[in-house]
Image (cartoon, helix red, strand yellow):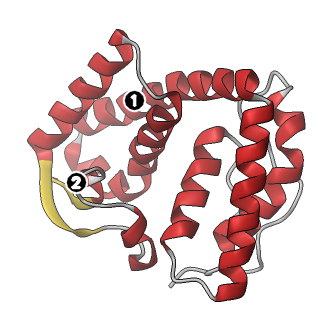
């Protein structure tokens, strides 16, 4: 079982740095705070990671105290996104371009050598989830981006083996199967 406070602590570390990050030229921002002892290092600060951590936290069964903390963090994030909406949208667009490229890189590697790359899927699928969250932030995609996503999803469906939710069960409630179908199975190897 994962640390129930990991996502909330990520948000706690990221939110005070968000304005500075949004006004910078950096796409990936290293957080100054360390992750909790015994957990993986915090991922870099990007809009996609913020939205992923927020969504994961919302899916957890949190205590009333942690739930109030998450509500406070979500309100702060929403305020910052509104106040710096142009900078936020610019970062979202840049991250989408970077993540779609990384996702296609994994797709190519898998196609070339399924037996050597199928086991990477549960990690690499983070990129697909973040892409969906970024699309949700943008509200709509350009024609080229839409075609890229459809192409990648068509390929993925051709080699996808439906099954159980592949991430920690604590997150399942936040990622419904109809939208996040690619989290409910694995790839042929």
User: Where does the image place residue 108, in percent across and percent down from the top left?
Assistant: 30, 29
Residue under the image location 72 percent in, 27 percent down: 85
Image position of 108 (left or right of 29)? left
Residue under the image location 45 percent in, 32 percent down: 135
Residue closer to the observer: 87 or 129: 87
The answer to whether residue 34 of the structure is visible from this angle is: yes
Q: Secondary structure at mark 1?
A: helix
Please give the residue where the numbered disc 2 appears in the rendered image.
178
Image position of 28 (left or right of 57)? right
Q: Which mark is residue 89?
A: none
Which quarter of the figure has residue 32? bottom right
Callout 2: 10 Å neighbours few (<14), some, many (20+)? few
Image position of 109 (left or right of 38)? left
Up the image or down, 153 lies above or below 1; here it is above
Task: Report the Cα–Cα distance between label 1 and label 2.
Answer: 25 Å
Q: Secondary structure at mark 2?
A: loop
Which quarter of the figure has residue 127? top left
Callout 1: 10 Å neighbours few (<14), some, many (20+)? few
Please give the residue where the numbered disc 1 appears in the rendered image.
105
Residue under the image location 51 percent in, 83 percent down: 61
User: Where does the image place residue 150, in percent across and percent down from the top left?
Assistant: 23, 26
Q: Residue furthest bottom?
A: 63
The answer to whether residue 39 of the structure is visible from this angle is: no
Q: Residue furthest top?
A: 143
Residue under the image location 28 percent in, 50 percent down: 179
Up the image or down, 59 lies above or below 19; here it is below
Query: In terms of sequence position, does the residue under pointer 1 or pointer 2 come before the other?
Result: 1
Image position of 168 (left or right of 179)? right
Up the image or down, 134 lies above or below 77; here it is above
User: Where does the image place residue 134, in percent across and percent down from the top left?
Assistant: 50, 36
């Amino acid at each position: 079982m994962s640390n129930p406070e990991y996502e909330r602590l990520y948000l706690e570390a990221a939110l005070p740095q968000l304005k500075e990050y949004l006004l910078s030229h950096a796409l990936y921002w290293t957080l100054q705070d360390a992750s909790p002892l015994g957990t993986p290092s915090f991922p870099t600060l990007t809009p996609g990671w913020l939205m992923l951590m927020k969504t994961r936290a919302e899916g957890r069964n949190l205590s009333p105290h942690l739930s109030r903390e998450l509500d406070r963090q979500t309100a702060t994030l929403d305020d910052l996104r509104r106040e710096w909406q142009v900078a936020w949208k610019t970062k979202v667009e840049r991250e989408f371009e970077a993540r779609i490229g990384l996702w296609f890189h994994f797709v190519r590697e898998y196609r070339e050598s399924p037996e050597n790359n199928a086991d990477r899927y549960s990690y690499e699928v983070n990129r697909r989830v973040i892409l969906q969250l970024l699309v949700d932030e943008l509200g709509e995609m350009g024609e080229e981006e839409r075609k890229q996503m459809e192409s990648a999803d068509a390929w993925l469906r051709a080699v996808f083996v439906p099954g159980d939710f592949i991430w920690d069960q604590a997150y399942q409630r936040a990622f419904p199967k109809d939208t996040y179908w690619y989290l409910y199975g694995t790839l042929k190897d």
